[in-house]
Amino acid sequence: MGRGSHFVSIFEILTMGVNEPSNRYDEEHDVIVVGSGAGGMTAALCAKAEGLSAVVIEKDLLFGGTSAVSGGGIWIPCNDDIPRVGGSDTYEEALTYLKRLIGDEVPLANIESYLKNAPEMVRYLGKTFDVKFRSVPKYPDYYADLPGGKPGFRSMEPVEFDASKLGDEFDVQRPSFRGTQLFGRIAMNQVEAHTLFSRGAGWIRLMIGMLLRYWFDFAWRRRTHRDRRQTLGQALTGSLREAMIRKDVPLYLGTGFTALIQENGRVVGVEAMQRGETLRLRARRGVVLACGGFESNPEMREQYLPKPTNVAWTAVPPINHGDGIRAGQALGAGLRHMDQVWGSPTVNKPGAAQQITLFVERGMPGCVAVNRKGLRFVNEAATYPDFLKAMYADDAKGNGAVPCWLIFDATFRFKYPMGIFLPGQIEPDAKLPKDWLDRVYYRADSLDALAQKIGVDAANLATTVTRLNGFAKTGVDTDFGKGGSPIDRYYSDRNVKPNPCLGPIEKAPFYAVRLDAGEIGTKGGLVTDERARVLRGDGSVIEGLYAVGNTAAAVMGPTYAGAGSTLGPAMTFGYVAAKDIARATQPAATATA
Ligand SMILES: Cc1cc2nc3c(=O)[nH]c(=O)nc-3n(C[C@H](O)[C@H](O)[C@H](O)COP(=O)(O)OP(=O)(O)OC[C@H]3O[C@@H](n4cnc5c(N)ncnc54)[C@H](O)[C@@H]3O)c2cc1C
């Protein structure tokens, strides 16, 4: 835990009697990292391994940030694990792919820095801290058909982590969302989740094995219902935090960064609030802002994001308010891509702290997304960011697509999950809270009655469904091409022919769920260079200041190259920042006594 208010540091003793409060520091470190997501913890660990002292300050009482509730995937072209799983990759292919997707929206030097450092970062974490990842061979790039795109291999996931290694720190790790676990409790890695959701070979055996393993871990379950075997974002943040404990990198929880301290144009420390008191922490070598985006800041959303926007639609825990972005701005930092998000449609589940993302469900056969006019406007299986872009594009035409509706029938309801509920064969309507009906999900015996309930044009909806049912027969969606690309088919039902993403909507009762325009993070932030240094509006470097993760403008620019495109860069530039700080020969002068 953070230092107590009774703590008197050597610097307080040294500065006693000095009347200039700006010269007083409570503590001094080489590197101060703000935020305990994956980017921040990576930066602190790497700084320590490079021989520097580092501390992480975290506003929340739990560590891990959004990274802890995430899928933990990192997109790492040319990673060392690719040959093991039978793939291949080259720097040139990855560069071709990214240049095609990003265009000139991001400086080439930043993109190249990412490509060069990403596999190095993974290698370094493995060798230095035993924090390990493996390739997810079947997870295709999101635009695998483009030049340089790959049918898999580049996305990596954290290797499972035993939560008991965290000791008491387990209690202050942000837990994952129940929706990312089997039956809300049992951890699944990405390969397992894919096998279960797409009903791949052996899925029933796999599920039974997972249930038994969880059930028979009596000793651990006496402590908590949370699974000891951590996967996804839990494994990612658990293993990084455990490495911090081993390497003696302190983490101060409940310590909210409030301002940067600057001397002669160089950032030399931060101010933070801890238990109602102001702390001044001096950074001899650098400050790394890794305190997320601005998902939970309604004013910034209104100022920057496309309209309509609503803080209630986000899938991100209510922790990131743009503090790092605004602090950088106050020093004249430039901003980029502030109108963009790592978009995803989300659904509201009463009682959940934030909305649920629909990564998987839309690709399954037998559902259709419609606007208020009852018309399709998107390939339902499109990647989550593309789905969100389509919602806004259609809404801008006056068609009422923010929110939109996902319609499905009794067969779909029985077989597949839908964000707020498990497949009906496991969680039938009778098991759902009664007051959810026609509030959280809508049900009717005919499509016409369903359309009336949700305020969608009934005649158009009937035509839309008839047309889709025709596509299900032929296997070809001539309107939006659902099921036509490798990423569409990643989450689909391979037992359904001829197209695993297309099935008829024909069996009553019929269902509707409202999809909101949410996100898994904001994308815009401080402009940084290829060394993760924050740049002013005029392109000059703010010495001593670095930004990573969603505090920095995304290296991906307007695109989402593949699963792990937010965490991969967050961690890579955390590594880059630490190395750069370690290389810099000019530390800030020690605190004035
Ligand atoms: C359900 C879900 C699944 C996802 N899956 C993936 C995935 O598989 N792969 C992927 O790449 N991305 C995924 N994402 C997105 C990804 O999790 C985020 O983009 C990423 O975690 C952002 O990292 P970050 O370090 O910038 O922020 P965070 O992980 O949110 O960390 C920021 C930390 O800073 C702290 N903080 C904020 N303000 C202050 C302050 N003033 N002082 C001190 N601390 C502060 C916060 O409390 C937080 O702990 C997913 C997101 C969601 C919601």
Image (cartoon, rainbow, N blue to C red):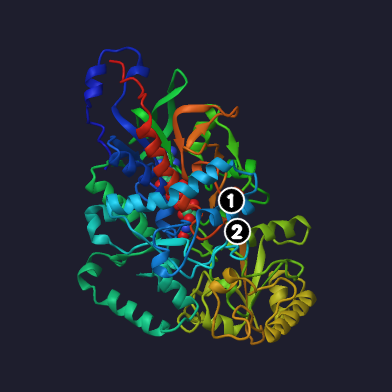
Q: Are marks 1 and 2 in contact (CB under 8 Å)?
A: yes
Q: Which residue is mark 1?
A: 341
Is residue 58 shown left or right of residue 401? left
Secondary structure category for the residue under label 2: helix
Query: Which part of the image, by quadrant, shows the C terminus?
Result: top left
Asked if residue 272 can be seen in this view, the reply is no
User: Up-down: is 480 above or below 289?
Assistant: below
Find residue 170 and name its label. none
Residue designated by label 2: 385
The amino acid marked with disc number 1 is: Val
Left or right of 449 on screen, residue 358: left
Q: Secondary structure at mark 1?
A: strand
Disc 1 CB within 8 Å of nearest ligand 1 atom: no
Rendered-image quadrant of the N terminus? top left
Q: Is residue 195 above or below residue 2?
A: below
Q: Position of residue 149 (x, y in %)?
A: 57, 62
At a point 44% along the width and 59% down the height, the residue shown is 73
Kind of residue sitting beneath label 2: Pro
Q: Residues within 10 Å of mark 2 (few under 14, many from 20)?
A: many
Q: Residue at x 49, y 27 (%)?
A: 542
Separation of marks 1 and 2 at Cα, in angstroms: 8 Å
Q: Position of residue 390 (x, y in %)?
A: 69, 60
